[in-house]
Amino acid sequence: MKPLTILATALAFAASANASSADDWAKRSIYQVITDRYARPVDSTDNCNITKYCGGTWSGLVNRLDYIQEMGFTAVQISPIQENLPEDTIYGEAFHGYWPQNLYELNAHFGTANDLNHLVSELHKRDMYLMVDVVANEFAYSVGGTNMTAANSTLIDYSVFVPFNQSSDFTPYCPIVDWSNQTEYTNCWLGYQGVATPRIKTTEPTIAATLNQWIADLVSTYNIDGIRIDGAKQIEPNFFPNFTNSAGVYAMGEVYDGDAEFLCGYQNLTSGLENYALYGKIIDAFTAGKMTDLVSMVGAMRQACQSPQYLANFIENQDNPRFATLTQDIALAKNALAFTILSDGIPKMYYGQEQHLPGNYSPYNRQALWPTQYNKSTDLYNLTATLNKLRNHAISINDHYVTNWSSILYTDGSTYATRKGPNGAQIVAVLSNQGLQGGDYTLQIPGVADPGMNLTEVTLCNSTVVAGENGTITVPMGRGQPRVYYPTFNLNGSGLCGFSSSSSFSPSSKGSSGSSNTTSSGTPAASSSLPQGAGPTVKTSAWLGLSILILSGLFML
Ligand SMILES: *[C@@H]1O[C@H](CO)[C@@H](O)[C@H](O)[C@H]1NC(C)=O
Ligand SMILES: *[C@@H]1O[C@H](CO)[C@@H](O)[C@H](O)[C@H]1NC(C)=O
Ligand SMILES: *[C@@H]1O[C@H](CO)[C@@H](O)[C@H](O)[C@H]1NC(C)=O
Ligand SMILES: *[C@@H]1O[C@H](CO)[C@@H](O)[C@H](O)[C@H]1NC(C)=O
Ligand SMILES: *[C@@H]1O[C@H](CO)[C@@H](O)[C@H](O)[C@H]1NC(C)=O
Ligand SMILES: *[C@@H]1O[C@H](CO)[C@@H](O)[C@H](O)[C@H]1NC(C)=O
Ligand SMILES: *[C@@H]1O[C@H](CO)[C@@H](O)[C@H](O)[C@H]1NC(C)=O
Ligand SMILES: *[C@@H]1O[C@H](CO)[C@@H](O)[C@H](O)[C@H]1NC(C)=O
Ligand SMILES: *[C@@H]1O[C@H](CO)[C@@H](O)[C@H](O)[C@H]1NC(C)=O
Ligand SMILES: *[C@@H]1O[C@H](CO)[C@@H](O)[C@H](O)[C@H]1NC(C)=O
Ligand SMILES: *[C@@H]1O[C@H](CO)[C@@H](O)[C@H](O)[C@H]1NC(C)=O
Ligand SMILES: *[C@@H]1O[C@H](CO)[C@@H](O)[C@H](O)[C@H]1NC(C)=O
């Protein structure tokens, strides 16, 4: 071994100790909250002004963890935790956390360091992970109604920022206008008015080193299991290897871009990504009838991405319209939700989605959850619980589930029938975009299982079917509802349809624990040209990438 290789290997081992890798996260399912809007520490029905802090805290979240865990989630993402600008700006207050001013202080509105530690220990007691959203590339400053283009950065008192407190620590003001010009969107600032977001000069080695130390300390101080990197597309690629390795945990970058090749290219930098390429296609498939575009994009992502299992699938978040605003049809919401939980990747749900909350844009897509009284009887709550539990169960039977790529068994203009998981642990989903108006009919779906295997439909729990010749089952469709099947003999421990619930479910355990055969069957539907099994951990691959960069002296992504 060359000295540098030895060094890189040693570093990879050091960084791995106790840290949660991408492979650990691939088995998880994430519930995203805006801390201020999820739960108050003491229940109250006081009104809340949607542009201001509404009183949600980390201890409020602790009191409402059952609601999340009973839906089958195994990780929680919280909004940014740093001290933010204090003013009531023309867009309201910084309740969402995306306007940092001091990296070293917590946002006191959400609680104390003890409260945050308590949240982490309560999550870990439940074998749940914490992901913290971080803003690493910019600070924020209230500039009132002035147009930045006219007044530029002379409006900003840089001394309020910690630790970068001089104008020379930031790029000169220029607005991001051209989102196809990488120089521009990685150097310029977001926005014109109200809140200026000075862009930290992350290209300066001393500044980058300070940020790397900051994220390392933050992760270790609070025992954080994963980070989300806000605005990752606006940061130059060179920044990521050292930053994510300093964090030492799984990092999920926000690369807001629908192009599969472009998006997947970032997997070399942050193994995790929000799946913005699928996002738009899922929405179009289930609100605008464009099922074939979704099928094409699933194929394109499979080609473009090294590791689709590290990408997060979602249909709602703090930056996009709530699904209920796009269509009121609950059957469509159920199918789109089922897609995000059952396809390749990490399911990620935005708080309130299970309550069918509306809201077209910020801050209306960031309403408080407490008026719903955390109702666990809604259709979407129940379906989320069912499908998360089923996925968790499939992974506990055979953790190759996450890398056994889904295959499309059947598709037409309104149907997406898919199978994911090794034989005996496969989940078969038959999704529809017909909505509640959809009629009653049957579909013949081939390749779901070995002929003779019994499968139970888990959303209604009132039917078991036997796979016939070619592994075909007959699926009764109706009122646009999704149907989801799982091998009956392996439902013990799932807690579904009257089957026992496993007392020892642990998505973090290594290796498969089930009694079933773990190899993929020979059915054509389950075959895949892509390798199965666990890939390298993010840290190893990132360090190898880094050492390759060091060896070749290339720093010019
Ligand atoms: C919310 O606060 C803003 C800013 O103070 C104020 O203009 C607005 O009227 C308030 N809205 C409600 C519904 O009270
Ligand atoms: C600010 O000024 C620039 C340049 O004059 C102009 O293009 C832009 O529309 C203005 N923005 C707002 C929000 O007024
Ligand atoms: C910024 O504004 C100040 C005062 O209006 C002006 O003197 C200065 O030249 C401007 N700088 C740039 C880079 O536009
Ligand atoms: C800027 O921060 C440094 C420490 O990082 C501190 O010594 C200095 O006083 C600060 N300057 C201002 C103007 O706040
Ligand atoms: C890209 O943006 C930079 C900075 O705004 C600018 O100098 C450059 O001319 C732009 N390039 C193109 C091709 O537009
Ligand atoms: C990353 O860290 C290495 C080792 O400390 C350093 O040599 C390199 O310059 C850093 N790269 C960047 C882009 O900051
Ligand atoms: C990412 O890494 C792979 C090999 O690890 C390489 O083939 C690919 O070109 C890289 N992509 C980008 C965008 O750097
Ligand atoms: C969904 O609701 C049904 C009917 O109330 C109930 O029997 C079932 O246990 C619920 N499923 C889950 C996973 O909570
Ligand atoms: C499937 O279920 C039927 C009755 O529902 C049963 O007779 C048969 O033995 C089951 N097949 C297997 C392979 O378990
Ligand atoms: C299952 O329940 C649904 C909804 O109640 C009903 O439409 C369907 O006929 C039932 N299926 C069977 C096989 O009983
Ligand atoms: C099974 O597949 C073969 C080959 O594709 C086909 O000829 C046959 O009709 C299929 N049988 C059924 C019951 O679908
Ligand atoms: C299951 O595994 C056993 C032992 O490894 C093997 O004999 C059997 O053929 C396998 N069955 C299937 C359906 O793969």
Image: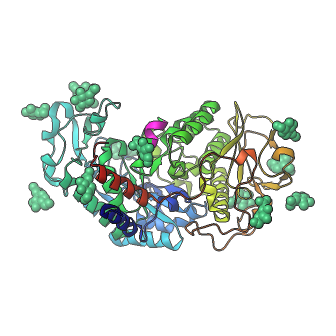
- The picture places residue 478, in percent across and down from the top left corner, at 78, 40
Say above or below: 121 vs 136: below
Magenta stretch: give its range: 260-264
Left or right position of 386 against 128: right
Residue at (75% x, 34% y) in the render: 438
Residue 111 screen position, x and y as percent:
35, 66
Residue at x 46%, y 65% (from the top left corner): 20
Choose between 17 and 390: the one closer to the eye.
Answer: 17
Q: In screen coordinates, is 10 left or right of 322?
A: left
Is residue 485 covered in magenta? no
In this picture, residue 246 sits left or right of residue 387: left
Q: Quadrant of residue 36?
A: bottom left
User: Is 393 or 1 nearer to us in this picture?
Assistant: 1
Q: Residue at x 82, y 42 (%)?
A: 476
Q: Give whichever of 444, 138 is nearer the camera.
A: 444
Residue nearest the viewer, comparing 464 with 106: 464
**Can you say which quadrant of the picture contains the C terminus?**
top left
On whether residue 262 falls in the magenta region, the answer is yes
Q: Main secondary structure of the magenta part?
A: helix
